Amino acid sequence: MAVFTLALCAMFALRATGEPAKLRRPLATRLSTRRPASARALSRGTLPATEAAPYGVGTVTPGEPIKCRAAVAWGAKQPIKIEEVWVDPPKEGEVRVRVIANALCHTDMYTLDGEDPEGLFPCILGHEAGAVVVDVGPGVTSVAPGDRVIPCYTPECRRLDCIFCQSDKTNLCPRIRGTQGKGLMPDGTSRFRLASSDERLFHFMGCSTFSEFTVLAEISCAKISPAAPLEQVCLLGCGVATGWGAVWNTVKVEAGSTVAVFGLGAVGLAVVQAARIAGAREIFAIDVNAAKFDAARELGASVCINPRDLPDGTSIVAELQRRTSWGVDYTFDATGSTQVMRDALEAAHRGWGVSCVIGVAGAGKEIATRPFQLVTGRTWKGTAFGGWKSRTHVPQLVRRVLSGELPVHRYITHTFDGLEGTQAAIDALHSGDCLRAVVRYAPPPPPPPPAGLERAGGSVRLLSERRAAGGTQLRLSHESAACGCTMSFSIFLPSGTPPPSGWPSVCFLSGLTCTDENVVQKGGFQQHAARLGLAVLCPDTSPRGDGVAGCSTGDWALGEGASFYVDATRPPFSRTFRMESYLKDELLPLAARAFALDSARMGVSGFSMGGHGALTLFWRHPGLFKSASAFAPICNPTQGGWGRAAFAAYLGSVEAGKAHDACELVRAYSGPRPPVLVDQGAADEYLRTELMPAQLQRACAEAGYPLKLRTHAGYDHSFLFVASFIAEHLEHHAAQLAS
């Protein structure tokens, strides 16, 4: 029976030759649970005065050395020591960063424990981190101060003369491997020196993130979304990303295949997770520590096996062959044991099985198998950083984490605060019950606004940023003068540079009980807006929040989420429910300034109450919008229960509501007359009692206004209806805005 260690890191430390260093680290000691005083203090937001230092971004002088603290490794098998160091400014093609969060990896421990004969001391370890750019050296163009980055030990130079970067077969860019493997920056020197003696310290894997500040090569910086939680996505600089990439990039697991994963550390569990997402039919999770099995099952393992529990004389290879007849389609070693690597290969399916080596073996170890295993159709492969091209792919992985598609928080089993917590994290990693220990070196800074947002003015704050249909989906908040509270909104921006006059755009107003997020998540408009080159602005449906006047009414059709897009004149709503003024006088100008929208080419659309808002704002303010459409709008609100109740509460009477009734407005309208598109579901339960499209059709006919009203059999009052016809509505707007 194969004897193997628990899962080890899938990374390698680049040596002077540029080839992988060997790695194998048994996990032995137990976790010390007591945090140092400074770590406990930082978790409360303060540090003792003797330890505090103003190292926040913006407090340093560009081009000058920074004095900070670092966890210095003085020699093999010696405890790390917190030292004051000078971090010199970045040179040409280099970037200096503030380390916010650092995850410990077995590669760090491999060097610290003296298992790498080419390990260099004294050095500053660490390579799995999240950081913020402080300043940059000459010639740096891809990142700027304030950017969030993940340091990547596998660089990506992207030069046209780099056959590795230009090939889709590998991610192993060798541009700086010679100096990186010698513990130096690309110019052959170090940026670290002891504050007490000026002694130079070696870099580690081109990262050295066990320091409050560090210097990286620009080609090792993956710029990521400012909305990303650095204490989580730091894991994507190493092991978790490697496990995913081994499945998706290196062997390309297909749906319906079988998978076996040897070793259930963070890397092995990431393989399990990725195999499930890829659609593997059966996933065997194999480890000598049965305590890992619950996590494996949670991530998608269908069968968990402890080789030590097999009958005497039964090997794990024989067991897997028994369960699958001819072996497993794809096997992965995430242990670093050369015997397990052999077992994984020999458990692969006869004729087409592929085995991938992820775990890195100890120094001097060699793999072996009988040639017959390869002759009979098995393939042996290896992976480094999962085949990801760091600067290109890591930001994409971060976006998938932010979308909820790839959760990483479950890999973090231990968290510590302050640089002193690094030693406690080392102990945790040695304990056997730790997947990833994260040390938070500094509170994360607030996310910066997207490019151009400074032009918006006011207190605009980015809440989230996600990739969608090649463009960017943003959610933001700001302090509204019109509503007297914090308001949220979303906006989709196509990729590329806006036209000289700015993006044409559509403002989409949602319905009762909705927020700005409903149409973003359910409307399916992004791919069509991207195709048409349209920005889409999605306001909230009302003021909201504890203490905001008028929000808590106990009626879902009144108050929060039910503004009817009017300026209320009766208390308590008159203090905050001023949505008409908010939209036309505040949000539209703000969005135009911040996101380069063309104010002369804006359309408006909406659903239900939002359809009412779209039509009434279009006809109340000629020229504000150039095009209009609506899905299942409340067409004659003074004749329906929702509208009558809202107008009475907000405006004092139903009679006052006639100034916000589309049927009344179109009869008196004298402005530009572009055709209006309205879609209505025939199976809508509110069709006759609240929506009344027939009255709008009659009013438009009386006024001679061009209305295109379409009724669709079988469609109800839901965002499925909106999503079914949103493409045609956006095409309607694109044509009007282009004319």
Image (spheres, helix red, strand yellow):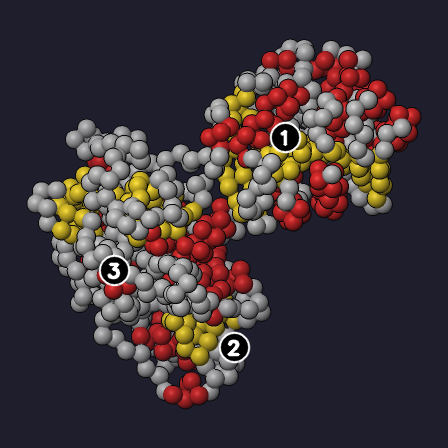
Q: Which residue is mark 2?
A: 324
Label 3: how many Cα within 10 Å (few below 14, some 14–19, many 20+): many
Residue at image location 35% in from the left, 83% down from the top: 369
Q: Amino acid at mark 3?
A: Gln
Q: In the image shown, does 587 or 318 lie closer to the viewer?
A: 587
Q: Which x, y percent locates residue 726?
A: 72, 43
Residue 172 image point, x, y percent: 37, 65
* Pair 2/1: label in front: 1
**Residue drawn at (48%, 73%) of the image:** 330
Circle 1/circle 3 CB separation < 8 Å = no
Q: Residue 431, image x and y in percent? A: 27, 55
Quick one: label 2, few (<14), some, or many (20+) residues within 10 Å?
some
Q: Secondary structure at mark 2?
A: helix
Q: Is residue 527 left or right of residue 487?
A: right
* Amino acid bearing label 1: Ser
Location of the C terminus (image quadrant): top right
Quarter location, residue 319: bottom left
Question: How far apart are the alpha carbons under marks 1 and 3?
Answer: 51 Å
Residues 401 and 734: in front is 734
Circle 1 — which element? strand
Q: Which residue is mark 1?
A: 599
In the picture, measured across the screen, residue 76 lies left or right of residue 679, that is: left
Q: Residue at x 55, y 46 (%)?
A: 496
The residue type indicated by label 2 comes to: Thr
Q: Quadrant of residue 367?
A: bottom left
Q: Can residue 632 be seen from the camera position used here?
A: no
* Distance from Cα at disc 2 to Cα at disc 1: 64 Å
Looking at this view, is 666 or 131 the one in front? Answer: 666
Based on the displayed image, in which of its 4 quarters is residue 611 positioned? Answer: top right
Residue with the mark numbered 3: 180
